[in-house]
């Protein structure tokens, strides 16, 4: 199939898992997560009960934010290193989309689902999330694939997955979208987000899982502090 961007690259959407570098490659991991996000957006639109819709939206928001945070801390820096002449412009554009998603999801977090304009905000967020996935699958990821080895694509995939697991779970539009600012801000936010998540889900089965991830976030924080101290001593 022809790439809709007309850039002569094979979109990740048209490649088999083997062509993407196997299940652990950043191309395969991104593709799977984009498909899951899309399924959640469609599930949201198919749902008629407002409370159930809200639950689907909350799940989607958390997943989209963690996905984007891990891109900002792992994938985009790797892309700028591999493609210094292309990397700045394209990642700046996608970071702008991530910023919009953070702002829209923050507005939705505080809005009444039955209020006028709520659905419009939801669908503006969906539109940016879908556009973002296309930017990555049709442009950024196939460009990275041309210059990075399969081993590098798998290493980026593994690092992206680690960051995705410990990432903040709520929108933070006032946090920088680039390292080191985003990574430093994320350390306390990952913990406070999960404390809020656990409080909200205390009665549910999700609490234990979230508490476990909070412990992982604290460990990440301690590692980051130790690394920063070691760097300062050099
Ligand atoms: Fe993205
Ligand atoms: Fe993505």
Image: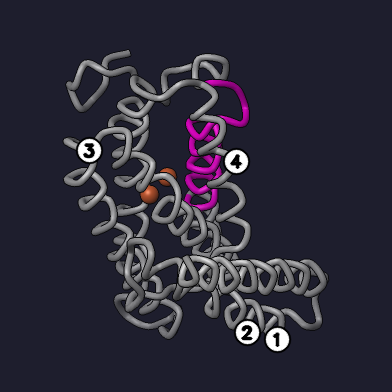
Question: Label 3: how many residues lie within 10 Å, few (<14), some (14-19) or many (20+)?
Answer: few
**Viewed as shown, does residue 171 lie left or right of 140?**
right
Mark 1 touching mark 2, by CB under 8 A? yes
Circle 3 SS class: helix
Q: Quadrant of residue 89?
A: top left
Mark 4 touching mark 3, by CB under 8 A? no
Question: Label 2: how many residues lie within 10 Å, few (<14), some (14-19) or many (20+)?
Answer: few
Q: Where residue 233 appears, x then y in whole percent?
A: 49, 71
Q: Which mark is residue 175?
A: none
* Residue annotated with mark 3: 84
Q: Where residue 224 appears, x then y in whole percent?
A: 56, 68
Going from N to C along the chain, the mark reached first, 4 or 1, is: 4
Circle 1 SS class: helix
Name the residue rendered at 45%, 66% in the picture. 183
Q: How is the image coloured?
A: one colour
Q: Quadrant of residue 225?
A: bottom right
* Residue annotated with mark 2: 196
Name the residue rendered at 33%, 61% in the picture. 178
* Residue annotated with mark 4: 158
Q: CA distance from mark 2 to mark 3?
A: 39 Å
Residue 216 colored magenta?
no
* Residue annotated with mark 1: 199
Q: CA distance from mark 4 to mark 1?
A: 30 Å
Q: CA distance from mark 4 to mark 2?
A: 27 Å
**Viewed as shown, does residue 137 lie left or right of 152?**
left
């Amino acid at each position: 199939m022809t790439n809709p961007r007309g850039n002569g690259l094979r979109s990740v959407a048209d490649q088999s898992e083997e062509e993407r570098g196997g299940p652990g490659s950043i191309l395969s991991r991104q593709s799977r997560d984009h498909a899951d996000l899309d399924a959640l957006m469609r599930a949201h639109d198919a749902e008629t009960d407002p409370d159930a819709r809200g639950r689907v939206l909350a799940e989607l928001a958390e997943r989209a934010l963690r996905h984007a945070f891990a891109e900002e801390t792992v994938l985009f820096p790797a892309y700028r290193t591999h493609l210094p002449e292309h990397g700045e412009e394209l990642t700046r554009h996608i970071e702008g989309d991530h910023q919009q998603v953070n702002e829209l999801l923050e507005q939705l977090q505080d809005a009444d689902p039955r209020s006028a304009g709520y659905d419009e905000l939801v669908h503006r967020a969906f539109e940016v999330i879908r556009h973002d996935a296309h930017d990555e699958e049709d442009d950024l990821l196939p460009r990275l694939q041309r210059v990075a080895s399969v081993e590098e694509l798998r290493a980026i995939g593994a690092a992206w997955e680690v960051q995705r697991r410990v990432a903040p779970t709520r929108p933070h539009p006032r946090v920088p979208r680039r390292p080191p600012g985003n990574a430093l801000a994320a350390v306390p936010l990952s913990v406070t987000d999960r404390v809020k998540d656990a409080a909200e889900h205390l009665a549910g089965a999700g609490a234990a899982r979230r508490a476990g991830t909070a412990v992982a976030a604290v460990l990440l924080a301690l590692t980051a502090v130790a690394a920063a101290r070691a760097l300062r001593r050099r």
